[in-house]
Amino acid sequence: MDAEFLSDGAVWLSPPAVSDIDAITALCQEPSIGAWTTMPVPYHRADAEKFIYDIVGPGWATRSPTWAVRTAEHGRVVGMIGLSPLYPRRDDDTAEIGFWLSPAARGRGLMSRAAGLVSAIGLDPTAMAFERLEWRAFVGNHPSAAVARRTGYHYEGLIRGGGVQRGTRRDIWVAGRLRTDPATPSPHWPAEV
């Protein structure tokens, strides 16, 4: 698959590049990003290099695209969003959406816009052609849950010990969006999520 550039005029998504390595390294020093992701903590420049060379590049060839989130067409990276196969790989028609955003860019709806764009291309039968996208987050990640809810993901439950973060098994929330689901906020989320 060729790299895709997505925008709605308020957020720009493009494949992260070698020129983004220093910015990614700096952003990933933020404790709140490491708290909710499986990225290495502490995060070093070598981790960003490995991400660019070993995950981003090969991912586009295997239906596992990653986009840098930007606030301008050629702006600095402020976050990351991507689709990846579920592990262990259960089917070729389902992918997991994952994302993070720097604290300075939060509260403006940028990630909801980005998730809407990525979900649309992921479910489009003429683009990536997934039939289902799945969102997962460690229990307590309310901002991530809000993005998923706003972009049409339906809450499906809690999986006890469903995720591993740096060697520790944690409970996760899971939600899904089918190709037939509208891209509007899902009303079926529990208040505590």
Image (cartoon, rainbow, N blue to C red):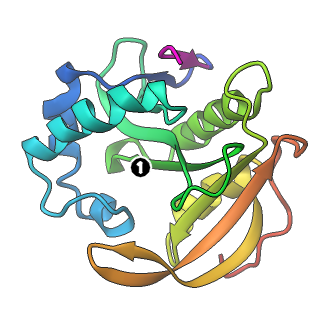
Q: Position of residue 106 (x, y in %)?
A: 44, 47
Magenta region, main secondary structure:
loop
> Nearest the camera: 88 or 119?
88
Q: Residue at x 73, y 79 (%)?
A: 191
Q: Which residues are magenta?
A: 1-7
Q: Quadrant of residue 21?
A: top left
> Nearest the camera: 121 or 87?
87
Q: Secondary structure at mark 1?
A: strand
Vertical comparison of 15 with 164: above or below = above
Q: Quadrant of residue 130?
A: top right
Q: Position of residue 145 (x, y in %)?
A: 61, 63
Residue 143 shows in the view? yes
* 3 drawn magenta: yes
Q: Residue at x 17, y 64 (%)?
A: 41
Image position of 139 (left or right of 170): right
Image position of 102 (left or right of 87): left
Q: Residue at x 19, y 22 (%)?
A: 18
Residue 153 shows in the view? no
Image position of 40 (left or right of 98): left
Residue assigned mark 1? 100
Q: Position of residue 123 (x, y in %)?
A: 75, 34
Image position of 126 (left or right of 140): right
Outermost residue to the left: 45
